[in-house]
Image (cartoon, rainbow, N blue to C red):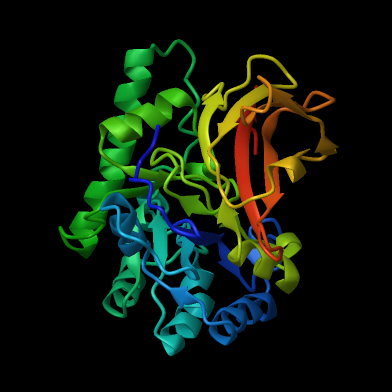
Amino acid sequence: MLLWPVLALAVPSHAVVFMYHRFGDDRFPSTNVKLEQFESHLDYLADNDYEVWPLDRIMERLQCGRSLPDKVVAITIDDAYLTVYEEAFPRLKERGWPYTVFVSSDPVDQGLDDYMTWSQIREMQAAGAAIANHGASHEHLVLRQPGESEKQWRARVRADIEKGQRRLHDELGPGTNELKLFAYPFGEYDRALADLLEEMEYIAFGQHSGAIGVHSDKRRLPRYPVNESYAALDEFARKAASLPLPVLKIDPDDPLVDDNPPRLVFTLDEGAYAVDQLACYAGGQGRIRVESLDNGSRRFLVQAQKPFAAGRARYNCTAPAHGGGRWYWYSHPWLIPPIGDD
């Protein structure tokens, strides 16, 4: 499914979105970025002529078929932890840079420790932050409860998403999240959930890697997750410069795995990348074989060598851009049953 018109540009119209959670909170290294790491990221963007745009502005440009400058990034933050207000907010405010916080409303309503208050969120919004929907409960929305029918699951999840949006409107004003942006809790979605978000007219984001481009699916847009282990400056720079690998079709299009290890067949559009150097990697297993199908039609098959453990997994595929120095990138997430134990 294509979201945006394809433009004939030497560098495809695209943007890179980074995703953070906590700042300077070393109790949770898997969701935390060290302050010196975060500051080095901001310095790098400033020193290398990147433009930091509001996420909704990027989405509006792509939806209208308008081109984007080559070096555009967006900063997003999930979950409304207190360190967002204490550490990220002053640093971003000092630079005058926009950013988007995806807020789960229940923890804020309940006044849980380590979460911001609505007053703090309003202060950030008044200073230029965009606030978007992360659902109300921050539950694993892909999971069905025992004995729950598909109809009951849809009604429950729809109510959770609608409650999250309603609480944003109640606390922050009816114009909040007008474009209807949504981030999947834990980055998890299956085809049924993605279809529900499309039905509800949301643009939805995951936590799988890659740049966003004209071939990206509005139900499952990629963001580069950043934590202590994936925050080295050279890695950040490589991701900031990445381009979207033009994936036209994927099979299966449902991340929920039936057979483990999963097979993925994907078709690429033409582009300014070295297709003969296409490489794919399975999470925790390293490089995996890429099989060309149909006599060079840019249709490929990849499959990990070993089954994945239960939970979340990925295939990442990259190809160097013609001329070198940059990489086209595509990430495909998988959900390996049973899920929801973290």
Q: Is residue 12 above or below residue 41?
A: above
Closer to the camera, 125 or 285? Answer: 285
Q: Which residue is rendered at x = 42% and y = 67% of the image?
A: 116
Q: Which residue is rendered at x = 68% and y = 76% of the image?
A: 37
x and y, in percent, of residue 108 in the image: 38, 57
Closer to the camera, 325 or 115? Answer: 325
Closer to the camera, 294 or 73? Answer: 294
Q: Which residue is rendered at x = 60% and y = 56% of the image?
A: 225
Residue 300 location, quadrant: top right
Which residue is most to the left? Answer: 174
x and y, in percent, of residue 228 in the image: 72, 64
Q: Is residue 334 above or below residue 317?
A: above
Q: How many marks?
A: 0
Residue 260 in the figure: left or right of residue 76 = right
Which residue is most to the bottom? Answer: 94
Residue 328 in the figure: left or right of residue 124 = right
Residue 242 location, quadrant: bottom right
x and y, in percent, of residue 334 in the image: 63, 31
Q: Quadrant of the C terminus?
A: top right
- Please indicate, yes or no, whether residue 260 appears anywhere in the rendered image: yes
- Please indicate, yes or no, whether residue 109 appears anywhere in the rendered image: no
Q: Quadrant of the N terminus?
A: top left
Q: Is residue 73 above or below residue 86?
A: above
Residue 213 in the figure: left or right of residue 265 = left
Residue 62 location, quadrant: bottom left
x and y, in percent, of residue 178 in the image: 21, 55
